[in-house]
Image: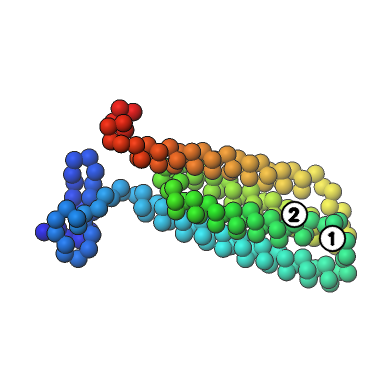
Amino acid sequence: MVDPGEVITGQSERYRAVGPKPEGPWSLKPHRPGSTDRNTLTMLRLMYTAFAFGISGVLSGLYYRELTKFNDFTDRSASQLPLVHTHLLVLGFVFLLIVLALEKLFSLSAAAPRAFSWFYWMWTLGVALTGAMMLVKGTLVVLDVDASSAAFAGIAGIGHIALSVGVVLLFVSLRAALRNTQISALPTTVRASR
């Protein structure tokens, strides 16, 4: 009889016993150490980051409305403040929820762990930098302070570069995951010849 949680080594795969007391081969399921744990932790990290960007997006919309109302600022096209709300919600919240779904379906973090980790940090940094610079520059415009500093454009440019690198890294991870899916869908004889 096998104790639940005990790891049994077999031919080329490791199996972990599941359930309280079933016996026989049906009580075992394939277990790849680290892949399930990594997938769960990655999905939680994506969910919490998306949630943080969602809250930030909503609060930036509130900030925009209250700041412009307080300063009697009516020219929406002169400031970047209305765009901060949209950028944080779409790039930070919605996009990361889509990546969360892709992670659930294809286990991107297990297929290409380094590329996916770099994607996550580049994307998070890019959205945060871009949103922060838009918020600072938009606030200065509403307060009628000179906002034409080259430093703002440079930092926002770094944020956009990070977003571009993040998209490329996401596609590298997605490609690796899709290749793993295609290879695992092939019959065993074809997989052995590869």
Q: Is mark 2 on a helix, strand or loop?
A: helix
Quick check: 39 left or right of 85?
left
Q: Residue at x 78, y 71 (%)?
A: 66
Q: Name the residue under label 2.
A: 134
Please name the amino acid that badge 1 sits on: Arg
Q: Nearer the viewer, mark 1 or mark 2?
A: 1
Vertical placement of 131 versus 179: above or below?
below
Local crowd size for mark 2, using a 10 Å CA cut-off: few (<14), some (14–19), many (≥20): many
**In this view of the protein, which residue sits in the foreground, 126 or 85?**
85
Which residue in the structure is indicated by mark 1? 76
Using the rendered view, name the quadrant where residue 6 is placed.
Answer: bottom left
Q: Residue at x 83, y 67 (%)?
A: 68
Q: In this view, does 62 lie to the left or right of 167?
A: right
Judged from this view, the residue extending furthest toward the front is: 187
Q: Position of residue 99 (x, y in %)?
A: 53, 51
Q: Position of residue 12 (x, y in %)?
A: 22, 40
Number of numbered markers = 2
Q: What element carries label 1?
A: helix
**Dot 2 amino acid type:** Met
- Is there any visible trace of residue 6 in the rendered image? no
Above/below status of 165 relative to 146: above
Residue 91 position in % (x across, y down) = 63, 53
Callout 1 crowding tier (Cα within 10 Å): few <14, some 14–19, many ≥20:
few
Residue at the top extreme, as displayed: 193
Residue 13 badge: none
Quadrant assignment for the C terminus: top left
Return the x and y of residue 114 as percentages of the image width and height. Answer: 46, 41
Q: Residue visible at 60% across and 57% down?
A: 94
Q: Residue at x 52, y 61 (%)?
A: 48
Q: In which quarter of the image is the N terminus?
A: bottom left
CA distance separating discs 1 and 2: 14 Å
